[in-house]
Amino acid sequence: MNNIYISVVLPAYNTPADILRRAINSVLNQTYPYFELIIVDDGSEPSLDPIIKEYHDNRIVFIRHKKNKGAGAAHNIGIKAAKHDWVAFICHDDEWLSEKLEKQAAVIPNLSNDYGLIYTSEIIIGEIDKNAFNYLVRPVDKISEEFFLTGFWAFIFTSSIIVKKDCFFAVGFYDESGVLIDWDLYYRLSKKYKFYFINEKLVIYYYTSLGITHYDSNYSNPKVGNNNILFYKKWKQDIFKYKTAKKSWSIRWNAIAKWYLQKSQKKEAFKAYWEAIKLNPFWRGNYIDLIKYFILRKQP
């Protein structure tokens, strides 16, 4: 049987040397050797080039943006540079277990052409409610377009996936506008392809300020790729087709309203509450909070 070669894309930005080495080493130490590792330095200051030069492995390809372009652009340049038919991703602050690629490559020959993505479970390290992440990891047959419109995108981690390269040409690459890039991509893929789930923890996900999903993320670029509101605006018409999605987003907009209130942005809070009500007019929690909003509005 011919070996299946995989392109691994590692976007990085201002990554501490020890953290970046951890991610790189976890790829180079894979039991499955048939890959290239494309490291994209998205305008780090200083350049990550000295760290990359520590490695003498001809499987490494290094690409550097002179200026920070954002997560979407960094992922896309890596995909476009990929030489192989399947593309894997590892976040700069995550880590792979040694058999990760081997176990994913093993299932590829048995998949029909309508499968476009393979993902695994993960080990979560950091101050986070692990149950909130893990209880939604489920076999692919239960994942649908509606699933990705309800707000459960985070439960397929970027560092766990490999995607057939042709899929990007079929549904589009990562959105570079700042929209939630993973969530957005998964939704588009789900319209055309099936996902295959390997129920093994093959990735270590570190919930830290280095990651774009963290509330205190040090990514200040507006194109970082973690904007919930941009995703909602992009797919609003689709969200309104599904009752479950509307309820989920009503709760999310309620939370956004509270966030605006904490920042004393009362007009934005009112707009958020109104959006929550339009999504789920029968949930009394929105009305109770809106009444509280009017009380707060009268306060200086």
Image (tube, rainbow, N blue to C red):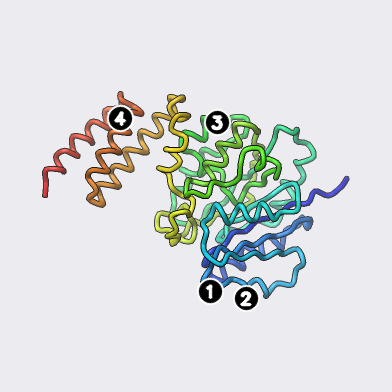
The residue labelled by disc 1 is 46
Q: Disc 3 to disc 4, how far (Cα)?
A: 23 Å
* Residue denoted by label 2: 50
**CA distance separating discs 2 and 1:** 9 Å
Q: Is residue 240 left or right of residue 31?
A: left
The first of marks 4 and 2 along the sequence is: 2
Rendering coords of residue 89 (x, y %): 63, 53
* Lower sequence index among marks 2 and 3: 2
Mark 1 vs mark 4, CA separation in Å: 47 Å
* Vertical order, 189 against 204 (above or below): above
Of labels 3 and 4, earlier in sequence is: 3
Q: Identify the secondary structure beneath mark 1.
A: loop
Q: Nearest to the eye among marks 1 and 4: give it.
A: 1
Q: Label 2 is placed on what type of residue?
A: Pro
> Where residue 253 sits: x, y (%)?
34, 38
Q: Are the two marked residues, 2 and 1, in contact with CB atoms closer than 8 angstroms?
A: yes
Residue depicted at x 45% and y 41%: 231
Whether residue 3 sits left or right of residue 222 in the image: it is: right
Q: Secondary structure at mark 2?
A: helix
| Residue occupied by mark 3 | 145
Give the residue at mark 4.
277
Amino acid under disc 3: Glu
CA gap, disc 1 to disc 3? 41 Å
Tell me: 180 left or right of 283: right
